[in-house]
Image: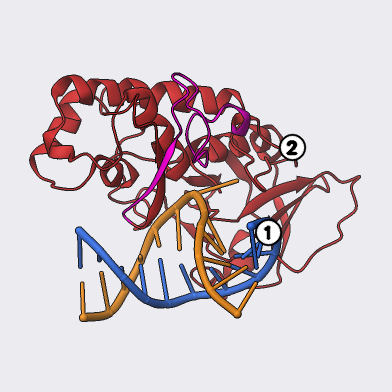
Chain colours: A red, B blue, C orange
Amino acid sequence: VPELPEVETILRTLAPLVEGRSVVGVDVRCAVLRRPLTTDFAETLAGRTVVRLSRRAKYLLFALDDRRALIAHLGMSGRLLLLSAAEPLDLGKHDHVVIHLDDGARVVFNDPRRFGLLMIDDPETSPLLRGIGPEPFDAGRFDCDYLERWRRKTKRTVKDVLMDQHVVAGLGNIYVNEILFVAGIRPRRSFARLTRAELHLLVDATRQILTEAIEHRGSSISDFLDGIGRRGGYQWRRRVYDRAGEPCVRCHTAIKSVVVGQRSSFYCPNCQR
DNA sequence: GTAAACCTGGCA
DNA sequence: TGCCAGGTTTAC
């Protein structure tokens, strides 16, 4: 589920409710996620204060008062839901971890497919975060010149390159499809053969789509919920993702579907070249 | 590079 | 019953 806009949305809903709170207890109900939780996970987290919440790529970082952070990745189906002290805690099959805060609120990590990940580590040195490319909104690092450097050393498709977290942080299948539509570029085009003008379009389209998606609080195509259980609204604004056969929003040509790098891709054969 | 792996649920 | 899913890692 969660790409950059969804993680950013969770961050914004959770931050005011968890920053400054301390952890009074941790229940690990199922430790087997993408990587198993370490046996000391609960005791390491208990007693710490959450100093600040932030995001890096698709990771949510709960900075703790000891220089480390709870690093969370939601995989395909993960959720982080905060229940206030007044709300009942009735735990389901896929509620794997419960973090109890000092005001009685609880943060529940739920993940049916268990592709998600929780880990406590120093974000400055954590291997999880090492090698991730620039944030799309970092105008000093993510620009045309930067993409030109990648253009020289890869023969992959433009879709593959934008999906690569080493190239740019936080993009996934929905938003790469949307970005390529706005940039007017087909997903199977060779990245090495894009013009400088097209790289420029990609940078602009990336920021435009992500800004719009964050404004609409992410995409709830099936089950995304923010940190307090609300659905996002970007699914109503999708231009191409999961719209195969439907009319293009610009020219009414039927949207095509094709597989690129094992992932479904959608594009308008008229608007995208 | 490309494919398969990890896991569950929903839908045709 | 089989295929698909918003992600990432690992192995040919």
Residue C9 position, x and y percent, is 35, 66
Q: Which mark is residue A230?
A: 2
How many angstroms separate mark 2 from mark 1 (CA)?
A: 15 Å
Q: Quadrant of residue A42?
A: bottom right
Residue A33 position, x and y percent, is 55, 69
Q: Which mark is residue A110?
A: 1
- Is A243 colored magenta in this rendering? yes
The amino acid type found where label 1 is placed reads Asn
Q: Secondary structure at mark 2?
A: loop
Q: Main secondary structure of the magenta part?
A: loop
Crowd tier of the residue under label 2, counting other residues whose Cα lies within 10 Å: few below 14, some 14–19, many 20 or above = some
Residue drawn at point x = 14 percent, y = 25 percent: A195
Name the subunit of mark 1. Answer: A
Residue A53 visible at all: no
- For the magenta stretch, what is the residue range? A235-261
Q: Could you say which is closer to the camera, residue A250 or residue A181?
A: A250
Q: Is residue A47 left or right of residue A56?
A: right
Q: Quadrant of residue A52?
A: top right
Q: Secondary structure at mark 1?
A: strand
The amino acid type found where label 2 is placed reads Arg
Residue B4 position, x and y percent, is 37, 76
Q: Are marks 2 and 1 in contact (CB under 8 Å)?
A: no
Rendered position, A30 above or below A209: below
Name the subunit of mark 2. Answer: A
Residue drawn at point x = 62 percent, y = 44 percent: A50
